[in-house]
């Protein structure tokens, strides 16, 4: 299957999901630079579809990311979360300016949302989507989207392996989506993964 086929399939899954489309419409109203919804919002939808899960897995939260290096307020994310909650109270919102997170993560300064996502612990999570003014979807990824449809969880060596392993175990992905397989694990073993 070509990369365009994966992209078309992903866009179809998102546009067919009324809650996700509502979330994208809400986020678009913030009009933030490089503003997308990422992580489980997309990852879980694809894994659910590939497992035939209907209804879909409930989202713990919706991760909104944007990139504004000029932002000075330390609590601006709370302002955006409150605005989104007012628009759509059924969703737990988490908004983060990726231009500021390199300090917390002890990384070099990020240059964009795509660059920031390239530091996330697992590669399949580094996919984001936004709704454009013309109604179309803009999908970005640090590592491509094919691996998400391959049902893999891939370690990103820009992070500590223990952080990756803790996320895989703590989020119970391999139990909830049993067709998933670990990919590109250091030393070809699970290093303590259950």
Image (cartoon, rainbow, N blue to C red):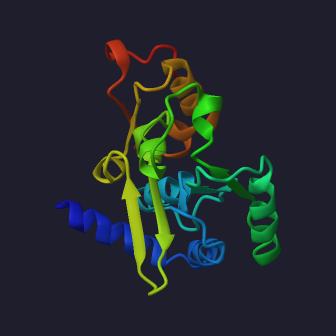
Residue 178 seen? no
Name above or below for residue 194 compared with residue 123.
Answer: above
Query: Which residue shows up at 49% across the image and 29% down it?
Result: 108
Residue 157, quarter of the rendered image: top left
Name above or below for residue 70 compared with residue 82.
Answer: above
Left or right, 189 with reference to 96: left
Query: Which residue shows up at 42% across the image and 40% down it?
Result: 118
Query: Which residue shows up at 31% across the image and 46% down it?
Result: 147
- Tell which residue pokes out farthest to the left in this image: 2
Where residue 170 appears, as percent x and y from the top left, is 64, 32
Left or right, 154 with reference to 166: left
Q: Quadrant of the N terminus?
A: bottom left
Q: Nearer the viewer, residue 51 or 188?
A: 188
Where residue 164 appears, as percent x and y from the top left, is 52, 27
Q: Nearer the viewer, residue 124 or 87?
A: 87
Where residue 4 appears, as percent x and y from the top left, is 22, 66
Residue 91 seen? yes
Where residue 45 appears, as percent x and y from the top left, is 49, 61
Q: Nearer the viewer, residue 109 or 176?
A: 109
Name above or below for residue 97 compared with residue 152.
Answer: below
């Amino acid at each position: 299957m070509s990369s365009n086929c994966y992209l078309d399939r992903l866009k179809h899954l998102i546009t067919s999901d009324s809650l996700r489309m509502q979330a994208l419409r809400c986020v678009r109203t913030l009009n933030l630079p490089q503003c997308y919804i990422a992580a489980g919002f997309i990852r879980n939808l694809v894994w659910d579809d590939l497992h035939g899960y209907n209804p879909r897995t409930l989202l713990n939260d919706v991760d909104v990311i944007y990139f504004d290096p000029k932002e000075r307020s330390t609590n601006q994310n709370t302002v955006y979360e409150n605005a989104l909650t007012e628009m759509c109270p059924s969703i737990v919102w988490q908004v983060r300016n990726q231009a500021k997170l390199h300090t917390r993560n002890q990384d070099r300064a990020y240059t964009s949302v795509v660059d920031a996502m390239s530091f996330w612990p697992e590669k399949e999570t580094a996919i984001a989507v936004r709704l454009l003014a013309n109604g179309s979807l803009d999908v970005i990824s640090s590592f491509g989207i094919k691996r998400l449809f391959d049902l893999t969880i891939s370690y990103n060596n820009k992070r500590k392996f223990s952080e990756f392993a803790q996320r895989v175990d703590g989020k119970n992905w391999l139990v909830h989506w049993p067709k998933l397989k670990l990919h590109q694990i250091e030393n070809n073993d699970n290093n303590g993964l259950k």
